[in-house]
Amino acid sequence: MATTDRMQPRLGSTDSSRLTLGAVLVALAGVGLVGYGILFLIRNFIGLTELGLSPRQVGGTPEQIRTFSPDLYEYISHLHTAISGLLIALGITVVALA
């Protein structure tokens, strides 16, 4: 049985450059995820609220939440820390797979 060249896909220079561009874009998205995770972690210790949320939308400042319910404050802080770790790990995984 003879094989023909039509059955064997070949990567041309444009296909190779498109694959490289795609890998670079995926890696940049992973770096963005790591950066957002770090920003999320820093924001947890500085302002407690997420980006785009004001104290008016949350119902109070971090100090007011801590005064009202220390357990709630610690719970929110714990969740933010866990989510930031997840974002950082996901970003590292995306970069590694790119």
Image: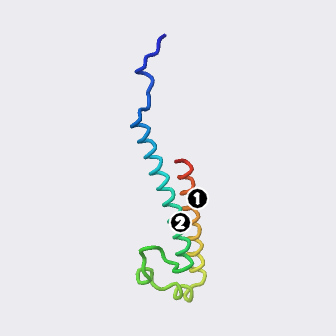
Real-space Cα separation, disc 2 to disc 1, in angstroms: 9 Å
As drawn, is 23 to the left or to the right of 73? left
Q: On the rendered structure, is 55 left or right of 34?
A: left
Instruction: Identify the disc placed on residue 89.
Output: 1
For image coordinates 57% across by 78% down, the residue present is 45
Instruction: Identify which residue is drawn at 45% across, 23% down.
Output: 8
The furthest residue to the front: 13
Dot 1: element: helix
Which residue is located at x 51 percent, y 58 percent?
A: 31
Tell me if mark 1 has few (under 14), some (14-19) or many (20+) residues whose alpha carbon lies within 10 angstroms of its own: some
Contact between marks 2 and 1 (CB within 8 A): the answer is: yes
Which dot marks residue 11? none
> Is residue 83 shown above or below 58?
above
Residue corresponding to mark 2: 37
- The amino acid on which the numbered mark 1 sits, given as a three-letter code, is Ala
x, y (%) of residue 27? 50, 52
- Which quadrant would residue 18 be assigned to in this image? top left
Element type where label 2 sits in the image = helix
Question: Is the image coloured rainbow, by chain, by secondary structure, or in one colour?
Answer: rainbow
**Residue 37 placement (x, y as % from top left):** 53, 65
Residue 88 position, x and y percent, is: 56, 61
The number of callouts visible is 2
N-terminal label among 2 and 1: 2
The kind of residue on which mark 2 rests is: Gly
Quick one: 4 or 20, which is closer to the camera? 20
- Which of the 4 image quarters holds residue 79? bottom right
